[in-house]
Image (spheres, grey):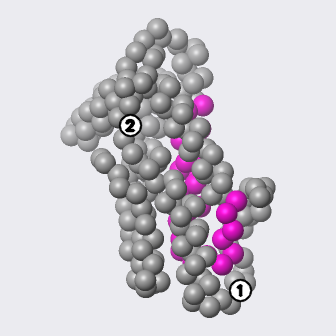
Amino acid sequence: MVRHVSNNYQSWIDGGPPAKVPVLSVVDRSHATLAYWRTAVENLHEIRFQVPTSELPSEQVFAEMLSRLKTLTDQAKVAPWDQVDRDLVSMAICHFLIDDRLFQLKTERDEWMKQHPASTANASSSKEASAQWQSFVAAVQADAELLDKLPQGPERKTLEAALEFEQQRLDQFHEIESMQSVLQKRYPGLTFPLPEISQ
């Protein structure tokens, strides 16, 4: 049964975790934590971090990816967290905000494209578009002044926001790996699995 997002996610955003956390056995907390991990982290891991390799048009692949990500994050936001490890819940909530930022960037980008239509918008495949973007990111990392050389305007603003998001995603990936290690030590015998990601 799907509950309203405000039951969990929004209440945490507004006021943080409950002041009083029910006293639970280690077994109860470990099982609840693993279940939440699967919903709020494992299920989202591939769609968040896997580099697209499809030969389909990049716009089509990106739209499908965002649709799936929205569905999975909506499910994760309403997952029960009352009995879950507080550190995991705190991380997951922060990561939902990063996902929300991606949806906002997509909306802003779509609005800009409406004002600047291009006949080649769907020309490149998702694989080619990903390769081009990774090349651009590498160039900016190699020359920090490259972005400053671009003229002020919507294009530069969009690129700056996208690069900021790219760094957030990278930090997010490392935070998840770190949390996985912490939880494995905190709850011996549980693996807190993640799907394999090709970078």
Q: What secondary structure is found at the residue carrying circle 2?
A: loop
From the image, state whether disc 1 or disc 2 is nearer to you: 2
Q: Amino acid at mark 1?
A: Pro
Tags 1 and 2 in contact by the CB under 8 Å rule? Answer: no
Q: Residue at x 51, y 60 (%)?
A: 41
Pick the front one: 76 or 95? 76
The N terminus sits in image quarter: bottom right
In the rendered image, the vertical position of residue 116 relative to residue 92, given as above or below = above
- Residue 22, numbered label: 1
- Dot 1, how many residues are within 10 Å of its Cα: few (below 14), some (14-19), or many (20+)? few
In the rendered image, the vertical position of residue 85 relative to residue 65, given as above or below = below
- The answer to whether residue 179 is seen in the rendering is no
- Dot 2, how many residues are within 10 Å of its Cα: few (below 14), some (14-19), or many (20+)? many
Q: Amino acid at mark 2?
A: Pro
- The answer to whether residue 102 is seen in the rendering is yes
Determine whether, in the image, residue 124 is placed left or right of residue 45.
left
Determine whether, in the image, residue 64 is placed left or right of residue 177.
right
Give the quadrant of residue 184.
Answer: bottom left
Q: Residue at x 63, y 58 (%)?
A: 76
Pick the front one: 192 or 161? 192
Q: Residue at x 30, y 36 (%)?
A: 134
Sooner in the amino-acid sequence: mark 1 or mark 2:
1
The location of residue 157, given as percent across then percent down, is 47, 30
The location of residue 81, given as percent across then percent down, is 66, 71
Q: Residue at x 54, y 73 (%)?
A: 34
Span highlighted in magenta in the image: 78-107
Residue with the mark numbered 2: 52
The location of residue 195, given as percent across then percent down, is 40, 57
Q: What secondary structure is found at the residue carrying circle 1?
A: loop
How far apart are the two marked residues, 1 and 2, measured between alpha carbons? 42 Å
The location of residue 151, given as percent across then percent down, is 38, 22
